[in-house]
Image: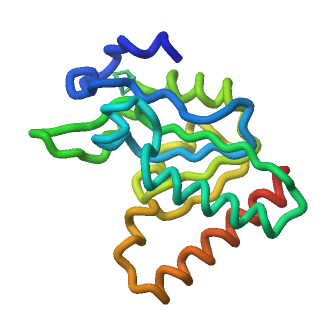
Amino acid sequence: MNQWSNCELCDLCGTRSNVVGYTGGFPSDLLFIGDAPTAGDNIIGEAFAGPPRKELNRWVELARSYTKHEEVKVAFTYLVGCIPLVDGERKVATLKQVAACRERLGAVLAICQPRGVILVGDASKPRLKPIYSGPMIHVKHPSSIRGLNSSKKALEVLRIITEIKQLMEEVL
Ligand code: SF4
């Protein structure tokens, strides 16, 4: 993915420290795709760095434990490779920026060859359709359920794990 490190195809080249390609092995069974890098991702150049990736991996492991599969390979990326910052505040990537970054995401999909995609967060869902039409589910971002009370959080995580398990059974 080094060819994108100096990309200037959209205005986000002016706000980033690093272009985030993808994180994880390839080919991957499942590819998580979020909207855009966070401040932490931007600094270290990895997708879903820190607690979010840990939680997504935990969900996958829990879902896997209810299947016959011994291992499920996952990878992580975003619709855009650069953080959308306006006056120092992270925003949702615009359709224009997503369109500009389509080639990079297409390259990630070609490398990872995922059997299924898991869209993460509310912003990503309508934007991926023109690029990927394979098996796909949509889950909430781990940070968006962190503030729920424990019973609501447990229910939400159970729902997410069930959907990931169903996706695994469909594609693996
Ligand atoms: S978001 Fe994508 S298209 Fe825009 S500058 Fe970054 S790598 Fe290039």
Q: In the depicted view, which residue is nearer to us: 69 or 168?
A: 69
Residue 81 in the figure: left or right of residue 170: left
The quarter of the picture showing ligand 1: top left
Q: Residue furthest right?
A: 68
Q: Quadrant of residue 95?
A: top left
Residue 150 in the figure: left or right of residue 13: right
Q: Residue furthest bottom?
A: 151
> What x and y, as percent, mark residue 56?
56, 56
Q: In the depicted view, which residue is nearer to us: 150 or 131?
A: 150
Residue 19 visible in the current orientation: yes
> What x and y, as percent, mark residue 64?
77, 61
> What x and y, as percent, mark residue 33?
53, 44
Residue 134 visible in the current orientation: no
Q: Residue at x 21, y 22 (%)?
A: 14
Task: Reply above or below: 78 against 119.
Answer: above
Q: In the depicted view, which residue is nearer to us: 145 or 84?
A: 145
Q: Quadrant of residue 154?
A: bottom right
Q: Residue at x 75, y 65 (%)?
A: 165
> What x and y, as percent, mark residue 148?
39, 80
